[in-house]
Image (cartoon, rainbow, N blue to C red):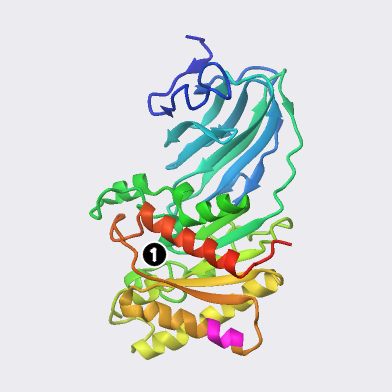
Amino acid sequence: MNPHRLWLAATSFVGAALLSTLAGAAPRLALATQPAGLHDVSPDVHGRVSNDRYQWPGLYFETKFSGRSVYFKTGAGDVILNALVDGHLVGTLTKPASGTYLIDDLKTGSHTVRIEVRTESQAGPNEFHGFALGKSGKARPSPPRDRQIEFIGDSHTVGYGNTSKTRDCTNDEVWATTDNTQSFGAKVASHYGADYQINAISGRGIVRNYNGSPGDPLPVAYPFALLDHSALYEAATWHPQIIVIALGTNDFSTPLNAGENWATRDELHADYEATYLKFLEVLRARNPRAFIIVWATDMAEHEIQQEASKVVAKLQANGEGRIAFIPVDSLEMTGCNWHPSLADHDAIAGKLIHFIDDRNITWN
């Protein structure tokens, strides 16, 4: 074994047949002792990051290069990372140690490396410190994709427990079976070859979190790069042509508890409608040309759909023409704790794609 590598038992590898287009043998992923002469390469960051720290789900980091190997640097954290080269999975790191990782044994030529974040990180931020190349490696231009789409929501958008084979899950099982890269948002973006952001937090609503639990509702957390409000999110290059938003499951899926801010369901409805309306107006001000799609499931005896559709109708009555509401019915909800399964995420993605194509929404 090469002494500068510590091969990881926790890293899963795919077979050589899948990666035969990259090299005669499968590329390898390892924790490496950083050799002399590395030169850093700034990553293309897709998602919300502040000083190399990230907390929202759905991030991915990319760069293009020429050579047979590439390094990336990550901090320790409760995170699952996919490492891909030219669209093929090289390995998966679960709760990786802090350090420099090497992907090598690539075919000579140009490649794109991508590190995807699969998990949600409400408890605290994780860190990614970019890519690096050896002496023979060369960074290549990485033009941005023309299409951008943003997904805003709660656990349904996160992909909470979507790979689980059972509805009964412990907290550890929820974490391990949440795969944001297989959520409907990632699927829709892949269909259109678009860059994407998934700005969602499990358990959060428009004005009320699940069962009245504490924490910022989504519109309060949304302006920030990290959930502790330490840094506002600013990105001059982020101008999504489509925004997909679904919020209300946590506002309405449980009865009101004593001591909450709303004495009646009617008061909750009024607060939800007014706050959602303001939030959509904020999104419109930030993204004047985007088409906004609001969707909701038929959970809570259609209460979520009824309330969300009222908000969209009010905006349409006020002259907003680039917004629409989509009801999504009859999901299986066989993921963890009655959340959308992989099949449900396929169904949601299919419905969104059909709507986008049918409405001929432009990406200009």
Quarter of the picture containing the C terminus is bottom right
Magenta residues (range): 312-316
The x, y position of residue 254, in whole percent, is 30, 75
Q: Is residue 201 visible?
A: no
Provide the major secondary structure of the magenta segment. helix
Which of the two residues, 362 or 270, is positioned nearer the viewer here?
A: 362
Magenta-colored stretch includes residue 314:
yes
Question: Residue at (69%, 61%) from the top-left corner?
Answer: 363
Q: Is residue 235 above or below residue 300?
A: above
Question: Residue at (42%, 47%) from the top-left corner?
Answer: 179
Horizontally, residue 66 falls left or right of residue 231, namely right
The x, y position of residue 29, in whole percent, is 50, 25
Which of the two residues, 214 or 79, is positioned nearer the viewer here?
A: 79
The x, y position of residue 359, in whole percent, is 61, 70
Residue matched to label 1: 203
Horizontally, residue 218 falls left or right of residue 61, namely left
Q: Is residue 185 above or below residue 6?
A: below
Question: Residue at (63%, 39%) from the top-left corner?
Answer: 62
Magenta-colored stretch includes residue 285:
no
The x, y position of residue 180, in whole percent, is 46, 50
Horizontally, residue 134 falls left or right of residue 73, namely right
Which of the two residues, 163 or 9, is positioned nearer the viewer here?
A: 163
